[in-house]
Amino acid sequence: MNQSQIIRQTYDRNGGILKLIPVFVPRQFSSPGHRLRLHPDDYFALGTIRGGMKERWFSSTIAANNGPLAPADEGMSYVSCGTAPDERFLLKDAVDELREVLVGKEMMEKFGGWPMYAKFFDNAVPLFHHLHLTFKDAAKVGRLGKPEAYYFPPQYNNYEGSLPATYFGFDPDCTKEEVRERLLAYEAGDNRITELSRAYRIQLGTGWYTPPGVVHAPGSYLTYEPQWNSDVNSVYENVASGEVYNRGFLVENLPENEKDSVDAVMELMDWEANTDPHYKKHYFRPPLLASEQEGVYVEKWVVYGNDYVGAKELTVLPGQTVTIKDSGAYGCILTQGFGTLGGYRCETAGMLRFGQLSADEFFVGQEAAEKGVTITNNSVCEPLVMLKHFGPNHPEMPMPSFDD
């Protein structure tokens, strides 16, 4: 049986729902938060040269931009088609084979595939102050821009780390010249650029939308992050949590002829958004009710109000069964509980070994989402909780006016 036949058989056998294999991604910077539910011995499963496991990627059809030592498929999701870890095929290959049957006509016509992924990123200390490039700036180096959103799941945050607050942009009274001076000092010493920024203490069960071009330094909670198919940034802070970042981190995604120009770095910023005096009003995302049935389930939008990505948190109460319909394909990850999802048994990860299978992550195809997925919570005491990530393919996603 060839791969095309295996993909189609797997899709048909499971009613258009694919079971995904866990994808952990190492990073050479920062310190692992140890909240990914990975075995303690496996946080350096690829050796210290690759760094600690700080991220888990979901529904990914792109590779991580992770340096010359990274394999070509690092960060890419695989579909499980058997009972062993090596019985698998790439989610990207499934999208290429099944096309609109799996991800919907709109996704194929507009983007040629599945345009987003999500991740848990898990750092015990705050991340550096950085931005993600706009589509215009990323195109100069053959990449895509990166809008992203945050949600802080209580189930994965048993402790808050060293600084549970996130910096966004700059104080409204900050000037471009002040920022420019800090960037010019990148190799002279600690540029202390967050002195010009503003931080918001993280509230579990809420989130933020972060447009490209906004400088931000994520806090030390584990964060669920739906985002566009890109892994591109510019690091404005040269010393963060005791770690030093060389100038390459600042200019790695600039064209070669612009890498010596601090003005080119400055132009990566959306200055108006960075100094928005009502930043929280415009970009903070408290949960919004999507639907509910008293005593059975509740579903909330936790990522919304943008043109790129959305996410919902579904909670099914103990012993209950519900069928949920959605307008578009989506990926999902369980954060609490166990039961069944479509024809699969599902269970939240307790402690995974690197490379093993799990039963907590799935991709729901377009037809299955429209028909409705039946979920049963088999616990007698705990809720079953699931995060569902969408691209720009869910017309019911709220788009409230944040100027009101």
Image (cartoon, grey):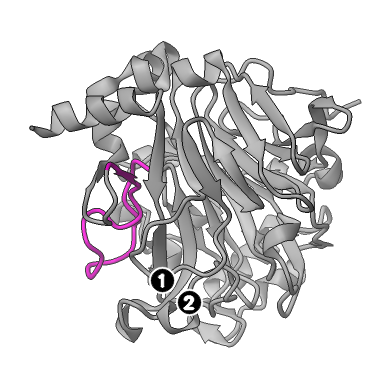
Of residue 185 and residue 151, the one placed in the foreground of this image is 151
268 inside magenta stretch: no
Q: Position of residue 346 (x, y in %)?
A: 53, 46
- Which numbered tag is attached to residue 32? none
Answer yes or no: is residue 210 visible: no
Q: Position of residue 49 (x, y in %)?
A: 31, 83
Task: Work out how far the residue at label 2 is from the one at label 1, CA to CA, in angstroms.
Answer: 5 Å
Magenta region's main secondary structure?
Answer: loop
* Circles 2, 1 touching at the beta carbon (< 8 Å): yes
Kind of element beneath mark 2: loop
Q: Is 365 left, or right, of 89 in this rendering? A: right
Residue numbers of the magenta segment: 60-81
Answer yes or no: is residue 312 visible: yes
Question: Which residue is the site of mark 2?
Answer: 39
Q: Position of residue 77 (x, y in %)?
A: 35, 47
Kind of element beneath mark 1: loop
Relative to 20, residue 165 above or below: below
Pick whichever of labels 2 and 1 is earlier in the sequence.
2
**Residue, x 49% and y 56% (percent of image)?**
265
Residue 170 figure quarter: bottom right
Question: Which residue is the site of mark 1?
Answer: 353
- Neighbor class of circle 2 (other Cα within 10 Å; few <14, some 14-19, many 20+) is some
